[in-house]
Each structure stands twice: as structure tokens, then as C-alpha cells.
Amino acid sequence: MILSLPFLILSVIAYNVIVFMTGTPFETTVFQAPMLSGALWLFTLGDLVVAATLFLLFIEILKATRTSGNSLVDHALSTIVFIICIIEFLVVPEAATSLFFFITLITLIDVIAGFSVTIRAARRDFAVGPQSF
């Protein structure tokens, strides 16, 4: 049952904790690295949140390949997370940022990809049976 929970909710929770609890700006540099070109690459807290969210999206897409009965629950919960993100983006002033917009966009991709992958996998499972002429 724990696998049915959408992991992208962790990004939404992390964003809200950072904004409301710590007040740390997302422009805070996490680390910096000199490049061969001589430029200095700055990796910010916002970059870290986006990278973690993309990693969680990858896990969600892998979860969508399962054809168990829990996949419908997983898709419904992912849709709820997307709706929560949309509402928060539109209503909460602290969420009206490009970073939260990208988190919302990634949750939309999760919903669309989840349904698409599940439908595709179900068609393959259905097509494996004997053919009738």
C-alpha cells in the first residue's frame, strides 16, 4: 500500500517546509564548482528541489509499469497531488514561483505518463493471449 502513495508529494512537502518553516530562500547556494571554461557553476537549493523532483518522477514512471490492482489507486492519488499543486499555485502567495510551477508541471507529467504507460502495458498484457481468427 505504501507504494501506492505518489512520491512526488515529497517534493511538495519539501517545498512547503522550506518556504513556511525555515524561510530559507531557494536562491541559497548549496555548492559551487569551477568549470573548465573558467565559469563558476552555482547549484542552488531550488536546483536541488527540481533535481530531486525529476528523480521522483522517474520512480513514479517506473511504478506506472506495474499492472496490479493498486495502479488505479496510485493514479488517483497522483491526480489528487496534481490538483493540490494547482490550487496551491493559484491561491498561496508563497507558491506563486517558477520553482513551484515546475513542480506542478512535473506532477501533471506524472499523471499523464502514469495513465499512458498503464494503458500501454495493459494492451500488451491483453495482446499476449491466444489469437482467434
Image (tube, helix red, strand yellow):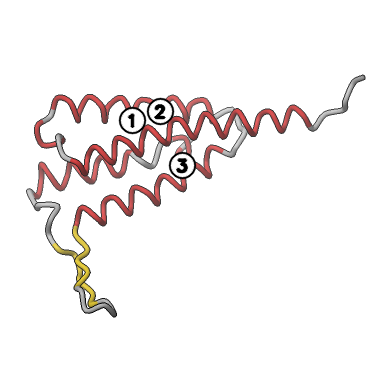
Q: Residues within 10 Å of mark 2 (few under 14, many from 20)?
A: some
Q: Which of pointers 3 and 2 lies earlier in the amino acid sequence?
A: 3
- Displayed quadrant of residue 36: bottom left
Q: Position of residue 44 (x, y in %)?
A: 19, 59
Residue that extends furthest to the left in the rendered view of this protein: 23
Give the quarter of the figure containing the C terminus.
top right
Q: Residues within 10 Å of mark 3 (few under 14, many from 20)?
A: many
Question: Which quadrant of the structure image shows residue 8?
Answer: top left
Residue at disc 2, secondary structure: helix
Quick one: SS at disc 3? helix
Residue at the location (9% across, 52% down)?
A: 25
Horizontally, is 72 left or right of 95 in the view? right
The disc labelled 2 sits on which kind of residue? Leu
Of residues 42 and 4, the one drawn nearer to the viewer in this rendering:
42
Neighbours of disc 1 within 10 Å: few (<14), some (14-19), many (20+):
many
Label 1 and label 3: CA atoms lie apart by: 13 Å
Amino acid type of the residue that numbered disc 3 sits on in the rendered structure: Glu
> Quick one: label 1 or label 3, which is nearer the N terminus?
3
> Between marks 3 and 2, how big is the CA–CA gap?
12 Å
Which percent across, then down, holds residue 80? Answer: 35, 25
Which numbered circle lies on residue 81?
1
Please count the marks in the image.
3
Q: Which residue ends up furthest to the right in the rendered image?
A: 133
Is label 1 in contact with label 2 (beta carbons under 8 Å)? yes
User: Is label 3 or label 2 in front?
Assistant: 3
| Identity of the residue furthest to the top in this view | 133
Q: Which of 74 and 99 is in front in this view?
A: 99
Q: Which residue is drawn at 47% across and 35% down?
A: 4
- The picture places residue 81, in percent across and down from the top left corner, at 33, 30
Residue 60's tag is 3
The residue wearing badge 2 is 77
Q: Which residue is drawn at 22% across and 63% down?
A: 43
